[in-house]
Amino acid sequence: MTMNIPRLSASTADKLLQGFVTASRSRWAVLKASGPTLRDYLQGQITQDIKKLTSESGIHACLLSPQGKAVSELYIFEGFNNEIILLTPASHAVSTVERLRRFALGHQLRIGVVDSLAICAVQGANAAALLKDFDITEPDNSWLASSRSYEGEAIAVVMPASPRGFWVIASPEKIGAVLAQQPQAGEDEFEAMRIIRGFPDFGREWDESTHPLNANLIEFDGVSFDKGCYVGQEITARMNWRGGIRKKLYRVAIDGQPTQLPCPVSTTAKIGELKSAAFDHEGNCVGIALLPIEITESDSALSLDDGSVVKILEACHA
């Protein structure tokens, strides 16, 4: 049986090069947090240094269990009225809120999932042109650079994309009104673009069974090794300083088509796993695979169970 692998169409590829396309990103949820000691509290909970968070730049981080296992992936931004906005996979939004509330003894913390904000994506050579419809100025060119509108509650964030792309955080009504007037692609095509770019998501290419350092948290600037203690810090630091990072996520090209996902990647034996795959506008199959670092530094031939050749392109990175 043929799998339904996301595909980037030729027409969407043309729009990306000439203008832009948009889509809602419903698999992500928006959380709001506030409180007088919120930043101090988050500093002891997340893998990245909260001091790096400014009105012009967000941060990427993970929330860990005391055993060092991932609870959720977070993108964190300054919001409005001294609030902080956190984006997390919708599948883990409730557990993320519960986890942050659980350790908040002694802190005046308010946090919850908000339905009054949603996320859409705009990507393409002229993606910045859409920001004016949200009354947002264009952020600078660095990853997670952000800007916001004070006329209405809207934030633009630079996200990894080629051509350039943004996430826009605004009310569902505002997003619906703006997107209704613009060229849209389905969320499956944005998933294809994400995979082709080599941008892994928690809950898709990695989960609680994979330590974030094995999911390229360093390459995506999601961890600080000099910020001090946080939940799960000891195991994370030990992995980094003692050579415990044995695997990483890699962009790979596949000469064929996987029949199921995830699926084994092998030499003479299984050594890794293809986590996701997508077709680009020319019909090339590209995926994200979890592979041992040592195998990527060798000349060993990699393949899927059906004999499809797997070629490593690069480590996934911001």
Image (cartoon, rainbow, N blue to C red):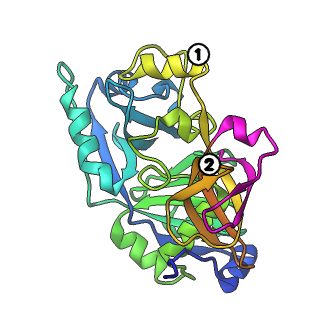
Asked whether residue 17 is drawn in magenta, I would say: no
Taking the spot 39% from the left edge, 20% from the top edge, the residue there is: 230
Identify residue type, mark 2.
Ala
The residue that appears at 78% across and 38% down in the rendered structure is 297
Mark 1 sits on what residue?
Answer: 242
Q: Alpha carbon of mark 1 to alpha carbon of mark 2: how far?
A: 27 Å
Q: Amino acid at mark 1?
A: Arg
Q: Residue furthest right?
A: 299
Q: Name the residue rendered at 65%, 82% in the picture.
A: 9
Residue 136 visible in the picture: no
In front here: 23 or 246?
246
Q: Is residue 50 left or right of residue 271?
A: left
Name the N-terminal-most of marks 1 and 2: 1
The residue identified by callout 2 is 269
251 w.r.t. 55: above or below: below
Judged left or right of residue 144, residue 162 is right
Q: What span is colored magenta in the figure?
A: 292-318
Instruction: State the SS at label 1.
Output: loop
**Rendered location of residue 94, percent (x, y):** 23, 48
Q: Indicate the position of residue 121 as horizontal and vertical percent values.
A: 52, 65
Question: x, y percentage for residue 126?
Answer: 70, 69
Res 276 → quadrant: bottom right
